[in-house]
């Protein structure tokens, strides 16, 4: 298997890359950059029971499903994590993830720390969990204000939540400070490259490679 | 603490980077490049009881010591690994490694798989062990011939040894194929960057960082 550089890489099991951060710390921007620039990683698409908004496409932003369907998925262990928010259910389906990992494709999960903890509990050997920290609370406030998505009271609520979320950093494998987008993005790419080279992920193919090497 | 890019990094415990490969697979070249380009990593200097050669400098190539000194170091658990080769003893002193790690500097070990296994046994939480594979035995032979350091019978012996050494790949954390120097070097740098961002290595400083963040 050849990587984009032409450098030889062994066939491997995919990486489950879990990225989490308080709102405004740059998780969304970093995820988007990674998905654009790296053709071996894809975003996990959640299922939800809430109604589709006019701006959303079924199968792209979410898989929109009925509550009865969601319940049966949860009961049959077909969800890697799920949560209820304002009476609606959101979850990560297991089957597409298993399929991607077996095919050597990586899956990106943009989830909160509770979601990250559930996913890691269910797939401990496959997960690389990264926590993104803002350089300061002042910078976090200024980013939330600059992106102009939220009313002032919503921003205040996000900042209060951030103070709680930040304290969950111990649940993650890696910690990256997003003071500088390019630096943080390079850190993220290095983590993904290193995880892909881990012995456990290539153990099925390295045996064959060595047989050919010594044959 | 600022990294060379200007991107903010947390103070951290250093990485013990162990690189191993069969002779001719490129371990020496890759190590030299890493030491030249990355100012936070330094080479571990072994102690040896063999005589200094005219081309060697004490404290640079080796620390040249008496057999009695070596024995007392081994007995006092002051060596991370050691071996006897043709009646001479070689070992890796522990004290400078501990000192570097505590100061947040990384240490590179260019050792065979037995050395790597001993070091990992003694410092399991600090080691990132990388195994470099040649792309083929034909390429390995051609590199050993091209570098023109060894007589033909020595090359044959190195190739026989390589066949044994390659089978020890399961003792390592990462496996890199050196088919292309630039690609393999980028893999190595990514592994080092990722290891530096691991939660365990920054756990002493991230607490303080978060206190300042929230305070």
Image (cartoon, coloured by chain):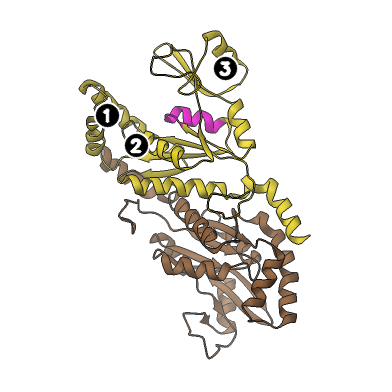
Chain colours: A brown, B yellow
Drawn side of residue A158 relative to residue B158, left or right: right
Q: Secondary structure at mark 2?
A: loop
State the mark number for residue A45.
none
Quarter-wise, where is residue A175 in the image? bottom right
Location of the C terminus of chain B (image quadrant): bottom right
The answer for how far apart the CA atoms under marks 1 and 3 are is: 32 Å
Which contiguous range is marked in magenta?
A: B110-121
* Dot 1 and dot 3 within a common chain: yes
Q: Please report the residue visible at 35 percent of the width from the left and 54 percent of the height from the top.
A: A11
Identify the residue under disc 3: B74
Viewer-proximal residue, A22 or B41?
A: B41
Chain for numbered disc 3:
B
Does residue B167 show up?
Answer: no
Tally of numbered tags: 3
Mark in front: 2 vs 1: 2
Drawn side of residue A136 relative to residue B135, left or right: right
Considering every residue shown, the one lying at the far bottom of the view is A54
Mark in front: 2 vs 3: 2
Residue B142 point in image, percent of width and height? 22, 35
Residue B214 point in image, percent of width and height? 76, 61
Instruction: Report if residue B111 lies within the magenta region.
Output: yes
The answer for how far apart the CA atoms under marks 2 and 3 are is: 30 Å
State the mark number for residue B26.
2
Chain for numbered disc 1:
B
Chain for numbered disc 2:
B
Instruction: Report if residue A48 lies within the magenta region.
Output: no
Identify the residue under disc 1: B159
């Amino acid at each position: 298997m050849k990587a984009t550089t032409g450098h030889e890489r062994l066939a491997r099991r995919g990486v489950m890359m879990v990225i989490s951060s308080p709102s405004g710390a740059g998780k969304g921007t970093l995820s988007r950059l990674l998905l654009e620039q790296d053709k071996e990683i894809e975003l996990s698409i959640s299922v939800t029971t809430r109604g589709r908004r006019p701006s959303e496409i079924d199968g792209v932003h979410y898989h929109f499903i009925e509550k009865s369907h969601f319940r049966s998925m949860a009961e049959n262990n077909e969800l890697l994590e799920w949560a209820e928010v304002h009476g609606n259910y959101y979850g990560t389906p297991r089957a597409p993830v298993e399929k991607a990992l077996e095919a050597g494709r990586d899956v990106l999960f943009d989830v909160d720390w509770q979601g990250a903890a559930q996913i890691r509990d269910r797939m401990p050997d496959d997960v690389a969990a990264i926590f993104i920290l803002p350089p300061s609370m002042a910078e976090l406030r200024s980013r939330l204000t600059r992106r102009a998505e939220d009313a002032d009271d919503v921003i205040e609520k996000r900042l209060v939540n951030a103070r709680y979320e930040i304290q969950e950093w111990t649940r993650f494998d890696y910690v990256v400070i997003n003071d500088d987008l390019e630096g943080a993005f390079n850190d993220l790419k290095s983590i993904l490259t290193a995880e892909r080279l881990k012995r456990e992920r290539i153990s099925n193919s390295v045996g064959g490679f060595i047989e050919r090497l010594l044959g």
